[in-house]
Image (cartoon, helix red, strand yellow):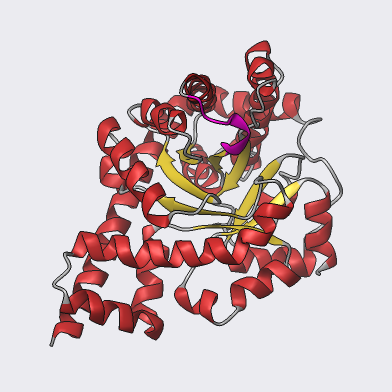
Amino acid sequence: MNDRLTALSDAGVSIWLDDLSRERIASGNLADLVKTRSVVGVTTNPTIFASAMAEGERYEPQVRELAASETSVDDAIFALTTTDVRDACDVLAPVYEATGGVDGRVSIEVDPGAAHDTAETVRQASKLWTGVDRENLFIKIPATTEGLPGITEVLAEGISVNVTLIFALERYRGVMDAYLSGLEQAAVNGHDLSRIHSVASFFVSRVDSEVDERLDAVGSEEAKALKGKAAVANARLAYEAYEAVFSSERFEALAAQGANRQRPLWASTGVKDPSYSDTMYVTELVVANTVNTMPEKTLDAVADHGEVTGDAVTSSYDAARDVLQSIAALGISYDDVVAVLEREGVEKFAASWSELAETVRTELEKAAR
């Protein structure tokens, strides 16, 4: 095990890999990362799958079978992605058992085209849950306004959920409320609450990208001094909200029935501005009961030079508020920033899905020749 990654895990941060491919599974690389790099979970998205399929030869036998049976593009996407996720779930099953279901998780996303369609989100989530057929699966559902009731319905069916695409603190509070409502309904439906888990994926680096651009437009020395500070401040205040909700009487009543906390997950933790430390969205967000999902480049950076010095969050709430207030005082609207990021996030997810569909269509056509 790498000492720096071990220190991160010991501080209460679950390390998840933001990548998956059939090559990574079949070669033993994923199992090796679990063994040597403290990786205890995996997240996926359509872009990751599209890249894996375009570059990897291990998909060819299944693609040939799908092409021979004249499978539609949508059904082929379902078959190819659920195969990878099912196999990854099996690799991580020992972690799942060892952690009592907390980790050892693999996430797969509903079609982002359903982000504003509650009923379709629920239908797809149920289909993916049944199709993968592994208890250590997470279904990724975007935290749009329409997604929130879908999250509640899916949880009420006893399905574990990774809520994704969270930027705003107020929306995050809505996500936690949707989670608690889902647990309450699940209990009424007779489900064992101890077997339902969830994470709330709070996006980090994109916040700095959007705010920094606006700070550059302001151009003052005060504005320049605030660059690279908004994302970490936003995430730290999200953790403050998490602490409040999961120490409430409402949650304690559910905890008495075996319910688990919905852990915050720091997503989009690869640094986009090369002038910033390449580990900042990991080392500055170290705190217990969280997940940090990293691209392999960030994982390697933390392993090489990440400095973990314990809790970097809970003593920083006032300073985080000061950062966001200072940014607002410059005329930069927090509400507008997070609204833009959510809209662009849904659009990027949809574009990624189109990319995946085009990749699968191309591979099916080649196999049919």
* Residue 71, image quadrant: bottom left
Prevailing SS of the magenta stretch: loop
Residue 223, given in percent of the width and then of the height, sits at: 59, 37
Camera-side residue: 32 or 309?
32
Residue 279, given in percent of the width and then of the height, sits at: 69, 58
* Residue 123, image quadrant: top left
Q: Is 168 placed above or below 72 here?
A: above
Q: Which residues are magenta?
A: 190-197
Q: Is residue 323 visible?
A: no
Q: Which residue occupies the extreme front position in the image?
A: 190
Query: In the rendered view, does 346 fall on the left or right side of 32?
Result: left
Residue visible at 29% across and 50% down? 350
Residue visible at 60% across and 43% down? 265
**Callout count:** 0
Residue 175, given in percent of the width and then of the height, sits at: 49, 27
In which quadrant will I find the C terminus?
bottom left
Q: Is 172 placed above or below 62 here?
A: above
Q: Is 2 placed above or below 119 here?
A: below
Residue 351, given in percent of the width and then of the height, sits at: 28, 55
| Residue 321 drawn in magenta | no
Residue visible at 16% across and 64% down? 72
Residue visible at 78% across and 31% down? 314
Camera-side residue: 15 or 277?
15
Q: Is residue 345 visible?
A: yes
* Residue 235, image quadrant: top right
In which quadrant will I find the N terminus?
bottom right
